[in-house]
Image (spheres, rainbow, N blue to C red):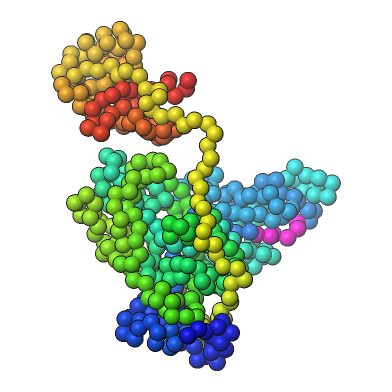
Amino acid sequence: MTKTYEAINEKIKKREAVVVTAEEMIKIVEERGTKVTAEEVDVVTTGTFGAMCSSGAFLNFGHSDPPIKFEHLWLNEVHAYHGNAAVDCYIGVTRMADKRPFEYGGGNVIEELVAGKPIRLRGISYTTDCYPLGEIDTYFTIDDINQAILCNPRNGYQRYVCATNSTDKTIYTYMGKLLPHFGNAHYSGAGALSPLCNDPDYETIGLGTRIFLGGGIGYVIGEGTQHNPRKNFGTLFVKGDLKQMSSEFLRGVNFEKYGTSLYVGIGIPIPILNEGLAKKTAVKDEDIVTEVVDYGIPRRDRPVLRTINYKELKSGIIDINGKKVKCSPLSSLFHARKIANILKEWIEDGDFLLSAPIERLPTNTIFKPMKQISEQKFVKDLKKKAIICHEDCDIKIVASKIVKENMNHIIITDKDNTLKGIVTSFDITKAIAEEKTKLLDIITKKVITTTDNEPIDIAARKMRMNDISALPVIDTNNKVVGIITAEELML
């Protein structure tokens, strides 16, 4: 048994189409089987609502009088990209405001624009004979501009990994704030409602597929960037008219100490053209598998701690190495369900017809990491021997070592070489001036550390973010194996 887009669209026009959400489809297939369900159900609607960092908008402002050709422009103090025609720009959602980094960015601008709020436009130009205006400072709303096109090169992720953190320090990521020692875990995606999980072979999704996008109608215009179907990490390139959209389904977000983004609502209708699609659209949360990944290890191939399915993720508690860990979603299942139901209503009311893709998404794309021609240096390449004192050392002994070794940092350990703290030459000078004699009174016990295999750039960032000039190098047992200082990083 097969159906066609034309036949399904005729039923939609007559308001006779049988439309169900992906969650409803699970129960229907369980009760009636895939063969009967494929005959009775015409369309399955899906939905997802989460942060889509590779999002942005093309805007056209029309010409000023006299005309200007932007060299640089800012929207609410967020630097937008100009390299287009004179008064076109692209604003990306992860670009942060010059004066309010981490608090406001391109995603917030797009949300406010769609909500009808006035946006400040400030631009400068190098001027030409035909574009003599040197600068402009004005306000506009979405109704004042000619085009406002949401254009997202990577969207609708097929699935996400679950992020956690094994280290002894809180880290701040695009997967949210991750507490130390597996203190929490975060995931994203709608599971059984997720569009690409319901058509994993992209039978009905491709160039020209009409979709729900941000509260309006949008289109898939190809594979998204970093499309990786071989590992079930498919992505979509989508676009739509911002003037049709709603700020309910386009929400600016600011991740603490990480940056800005935009939550985007996407829903895709899956026509049930055959029995195989009936089976695929009945996918359950327990059938969708992903990995729990340690984001505390800052490298491209982070350690995979275990595999897991979305049913366990959605339970709120997951098991990591025998520890029960609270697991929270960064996406909104509430909004995903709302999107699937709105799309269902549009189709049932005859207001949304399906479009067959002109070209299907590729299923054999090879995903490649960045090519790097310069050799990556690691801490082990630049570290030097640490000058060590024990906890019971006299301050004068520590001071003499600083002078003898010409070293500004002394590492404090116990008799087994386990890290206990660090002392600087300034700490010693201050202690002598204050007539302190006990080393334990002056050492810094909460020490930021590094490891042999940590990239130099990461170690440098730790020093910069914590306003320090040295990092003890430790092994997996917290034993001191060296030290790296700001001086080595400048070589």
Q: Where is residue 378 in the image (x, y as percent from the top left)?
A: 41, 29
Magenta part mainly helix, strand or loop?
A: loop
Residue lying farthest to the right in this orientation: 129
Which residue is located at x 53 percent, y 31 percent?
Answer: 374
* Horizontal side of residue 88 vs 183, given as left or right: right
Specify whether residue 63 is painted magenta: yes
Q: Where is residue 285 in the image (x, y as percent from the top left)?
A: 33, 68
Give the residues in magenta.
59-64
Residue lying farthest to the front in this orientation: 1
Which residue is located at x 39 percent, y 52 percent?
Answer: 175
Residue 252 at least partly seen: no
Which residue is located at x 49 percent, y 45 percent?
Answer: 369
Specify whether residue 296 is painted magenta: no
Relative to 426, does residue 158 appear above or below in the rendering? below
Which residue is located at x 69 percent, y 65 percent?
Answer: 146
Residue 419 at least partly seen: yes
Q: Position of residue 225 (x, y in %)?
A: 54, 55
Number of numbered discs = 0
Picture quarter containing residue 171?
top left
Q: Where is residue 92 in the image (x, y as percent from the top left)?
A: 56, 53
Of residues 487 and 30, the one nearer the viewer is 30
Relative to 289, does residue 40 appear above or below in the rendering? below
Picture quarter containing residue 32?
bottom left
Of residues 476 and 317, the one nearer the viewer is 476
